[in-house]
Image (tube, rainbow, N blue to C red):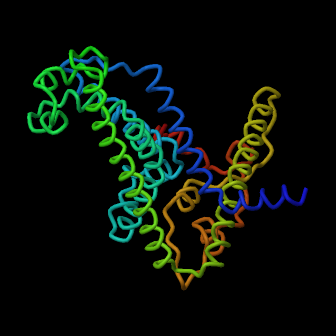
């Protein structure tokens, strides 16, 4: 049991690393299945286009999914068009670019893994480069071979070339070697870039290592509790409204933050050495004078916060 707890603690501390590793492994597995089941090189003039599409388009799709599935993306862009102060101010614009960079670095894990594994596998690159319409490249891979190699290069992935089996295998080995070298270069470049960016980020950290650990623990706890509290409060409000509607009775008072409060806790936050707040919500709770507000009685005799859902009534709801 103690060993299990030790492993669990290690996993919790390195959760981000394990998450990136899981994404990379899932992407690698998907690429292997994709190349085996779906990919079929046409062995024609379409080789170059077909191979490059399979190499790059899935990576682009994975990158877009990375943006779509990131909560930071929607927190950043929601309301940005209607509230220019979110991005137009210089300090806000810098924070905006910083968050976009963080989202991109997280989203690029899956597409980079796809490209690296695809290059190591060599199937897509082999198909693409056998259809590459470059005389100099063809002469390079067909060095020491007959003229048939230049003519039938695009047929090699399908085994339909009139070249001898040994010559065909030699040419394909050269192309696969190029693909695998590129794959290792991609992996090395990504690892070096990740190390460099991590070093830069740690060097520019406004807090010490131990305080950074506390900050991350706080942020995770706040996000988990905020999501739980949001669901619970929304459920209570919905139950109250349905009960009032069907039972034809006055609603019981439920205090809900107004639009301005939601706006204040939804913005970008940059740590300051003078404030020592760990999130925008932490800053709002510590500095806002309206936190202890109470429900006000409406004109109809019920209780509620009149500005809670005013954006629905005036037709300004955003979906």
| Location of residue 52 in the rendering, given as x and y in whole percent from the top left corner | 28, 32
Residue 196, compared with residue 56, is above or below; it is below
Tell me where residue 281 sits by quadrant.
bottom right
Asked whether 225 or 257 is in front, the reply is: 225
- Indicate left or right for 284 with 1 as reference: left
- Indicate left or right for 167 with 119 as reference: left
Asked whether 107 or 117 is in front, the reply is: 117
| Extreme residue in the bottom direction | 274
Asked whether 292 or 24 is in front, the reply is: 24
| Extreme residue in the right direction | 1
- Indicate left or right for 168 with 94 as reference: left
For image coordinates 45% across by 54% down, the residue present is: 103
| Location of residue 14 in the rendering, given as x and y in whole percent from the top left corner | 65, 60
For image coordinates 58% across by 59% down, the residue present is: 261
Tell me where residue 237 sits by quadrant.
top right
Visible residue check, residue 296: no
For image coordinates 46% across by 41% down, the residue present is: 316
For image coordinates 42% across by 52% down, the residue present is: 187
| Location of residue 229 in the rendering, given as x and y in whole percent from the top left corner | 73, 51
Visible residue check, residue 72: yes
| Location of residue 291 in the rendering, given as x and y in whole percent from the top left corner | 68, 66
Quarter of the picture containing the N terminus is bottom right
């Amino acid at each position: 049991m103690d060993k299990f707890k030790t492993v669990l603690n290690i996993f919790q501390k390195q959760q981000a690393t394990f998450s990136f590793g899981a994404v990379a492994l899932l992407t690698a597995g998907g690429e292997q299945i994709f190349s085996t089941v779906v990919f079929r090189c046409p062995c024609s003039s379409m080789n170059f286009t077909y191979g490059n599409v399979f190499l790059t388009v899935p990576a682009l799709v994975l990158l877009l999914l990375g943006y779509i599935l990131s909560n930071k993306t929607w927190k950043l862009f929601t309301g940005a068009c209607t509230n220019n102060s979110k991005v137009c101010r210089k300090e806000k614009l810098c924070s905006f670019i910083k968050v976009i960079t963080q989202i991109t670095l997280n989203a690029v894990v899956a597409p980079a893994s796809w490209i690296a594994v695809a290059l190591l596998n060599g199937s897509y690159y082999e198909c693409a480069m056998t259809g590459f319409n470059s005389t100099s490249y063809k002469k390079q891979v067909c060095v020491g071979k007959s003229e048939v190699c230049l003519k039938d290069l695009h047929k090699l992935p399908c085994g339909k070339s009139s070249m001898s089996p040994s010559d065909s295998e030699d040419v394909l080995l050269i192309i696969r070697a190029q693909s695998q070298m590129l794959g290792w270069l991609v992996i090395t470049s990504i690892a070096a870039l990740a190390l460099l960016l991590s070093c830069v980020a740690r060097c520019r950290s406004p807090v010490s290592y131990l305080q950074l650990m506390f900050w991350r623990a706080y942020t995770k706890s706040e996000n988990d509790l905020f999501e739980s509290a949001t669901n619970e409060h929304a459920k209570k409000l919905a139950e109250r409204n349905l009960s009032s509607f069907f039972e034809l009775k006055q609603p019981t008072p439920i205090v809900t933050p107004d639009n301005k409060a939601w706006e204040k806790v939804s913005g970008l936050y940059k740590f300051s050495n003078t404030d020592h707040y760990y999130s925008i919500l932490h800053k709002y709770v510590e500095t806002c004078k309206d936190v202890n507000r109470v429900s006000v009685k409406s004109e109809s005799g019920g209780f509620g916060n009149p500005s809670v859902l005013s954006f629905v009534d005036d037709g300004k709801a955003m979906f």
